[in-house]
Amino acid sequence: MENANQDTFANPFKFKSEWKNAFTDEEFIKVFASDILENYIINKRWYGGKASTLKYIEVVDHFKITSKKNTYYGVLLEVNFKEAFYQHYFMPLAFMTSDELDTSTIISPAQFGPIEGYLVDALHQEDFRKLLFDNIVQATENPELKLVFHKGSQFHDKEYKSSKFMGLEQSNTSIIFNDAFVLKIFRRIYVSTNPDYEISRFLTERMHFKSSPAYTGSINLALPEGNITLGLMQELVPNQGDAWKFMLEEIDGVFSNLKNKKIKIEKLPDIPMFKRLKINEIPPEIIDWVGLSLFLRLQTLAKRTAEMHIALGGDIHDTAFTPTTYNGDYTVWLKNRMLYQFQNRLNIIENSLHKLDGLALELAHQFMENKKIVRKHFVDFDWTKMKSERIRIHGDYHLGQILVNGDDFYILDFEGEPESTIRDRKVKQPPLKDVAGLFRSFHYAIYATIFNNKDKYPYDQDQLFQAAEILFHYFVGAFLETYIDKAQSGNLNIGYSHEIEFLLKYCLLEKAVYELGYELNSRPRWAVIPLRGIQSIMNY
């Protein structure tokens, strides 16, 4: 192995072995894991360790998969951090000579035996993408490679026509096939089936749920210690963008109406938080201000959300999805989680006070003064009083996970909360936790509109914030009326009004405290939003 300067393509890494035997060559594995990957991986969007210090990367497993023309490897990596934890990643690998290369995304120049070329992420090779598609179509199972390709009952295409990347690279990489299907390749992997795959397949094949993209196939690695989900294929649904973008545009219109319709904010009638409202009970002043159509859209979203929960809690056979009651174990799990998170956020606030000013600083001090009350609320979870049931939930439900399709909505991305362990993401929880996540997303959309258009609305900030809270209460009221009605008529046991209110308040507080850490770390000016949320939930 010659000394290589990675920055100049003039000096490729040189290996004695041929590419088709690369992973039997200890020398290659060592150089690949340290010199090559460490430089490459830290710049990728899907790499989740940016806030930590990389210690070393290890190749823990690999499989070889060949097309008529090429040999590819699926490589499982363990990234170890100085902070004493590790993450696992999946990387499909190809070796291409310069005349075969059809991508500019190169991992490194390399030479195997006499052949010079480049190591590239195999997903950038059309031949490899076609290979994945063909294997799903044939539902190939390869015990030797431990690879299981599954073909969904909704997948009728037989023939590969085209493939391209979908949008920007996110935490996963998505590929569109035949302009009809999306294959999401999971970059960060777990020795456990991915909840997105598990729930997506269940909703399509067991419950025939229509408001999320149909499951059409998957790629799993069946290892002795558990299944690893590498890919999930779903139908590509027609849409006009996500509900976050839709909501920002709608709310901008609502705030513009204040001026256009000369509305006096102090005269707008308010309602208590969580008061259920039928559309014909919304005061005419509010309909005049907000418009009827937005409330009708919220009704549709509430209906789809309830239908998702009815489906997720509607199986009496599959134990991973049967509803269950509350018990002591769940309470211990919940309180430990909440108190750990709460303490973590308190530490972040204490270290961030110097970054805050104005209202954010005032609210942060209020939060610190009332921390005992907030903490007590988390500890006061009494499972013996709970009469409702827990089910598998979406787990990271917000406007960005919902697509707008005409007057309707599609729900996506059942992977769960990014900060949680894979085990925690599969714990059955109150469906109202998803509802609370969506309500926090409404709150965010309202305040983001105010923050992003400060000079557009001729009112002072206090007045705009007053209008914001009133609008939020009506959003919540209209949504709850439809959601509760639909859930209960679908035999989903979410409890009665007192319990519903307790769970919503509990979950809203949990979400707002979770958001607080994110905002203080990444954009302190926005810490106003979760702090304001906590204040309005706790009424201190």
Image (tube, helix red, strand yellow):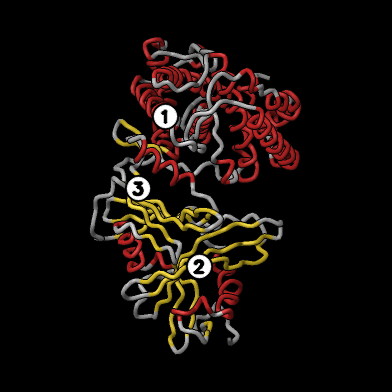
Q: Residue at x 54, y 80 (%)?
A: 25
Of the pair 195 and 482, the residue shown nearer to us: 195
Q: Quadrant of the N terminus?
A: bottom right
Q: Secondary structure at mark 2?
A: strand
Spatial CA distance of label 3 from label 1 is 22 Å
Residue at (59% x, 41% y) in the render: 424
- Category of crowding for the residue at label 3, using alpha-carbon neighbours closer than 10 angstroms: few (below 14), some (14–19), many (at least 20): many
Task: Give the percent coordinates (x, y) of residue 225.
Answer: 56, 55
Q: Which residue is mark 1?
A: 314
Instruction: Please state which of residues 35 and 233 is positioned toward the viewer in this rendering.
Output: 233
Q: Determine whether 276 is above or below 444 in the image.
A: above
Element marked by disc 1: loop
| Position of 109 relative to 354 (above/below) | below
* Mark before the other along the chain sequence, 3 or 2: 2
Measured Cα–Cα span from mark 3 to mark 2? 26 Å
Numbered disc 3: secondary structure: strand
Return the mark for residue 62. 2
Q: Amino acid at mark 3?
A: Gln
Quick check: 268 above or below 37?
A: above
Instruction: Specify which label sits upstream in the sequence, 3 or 1.
Output: 3
Disc 3 designates what residue? 234
Residue depth check, mark 3 versus mark 2: number of the one nearer the observer = 2
Q: CA distance from mark 1 to mark 2?
A: 38 Å
Q: Estimate the x, y position of residue 518 in percent, counting from the top left.
A: 61, 42
Q: Looking at the image, which residue is at 62% across and 17% down? A: 385
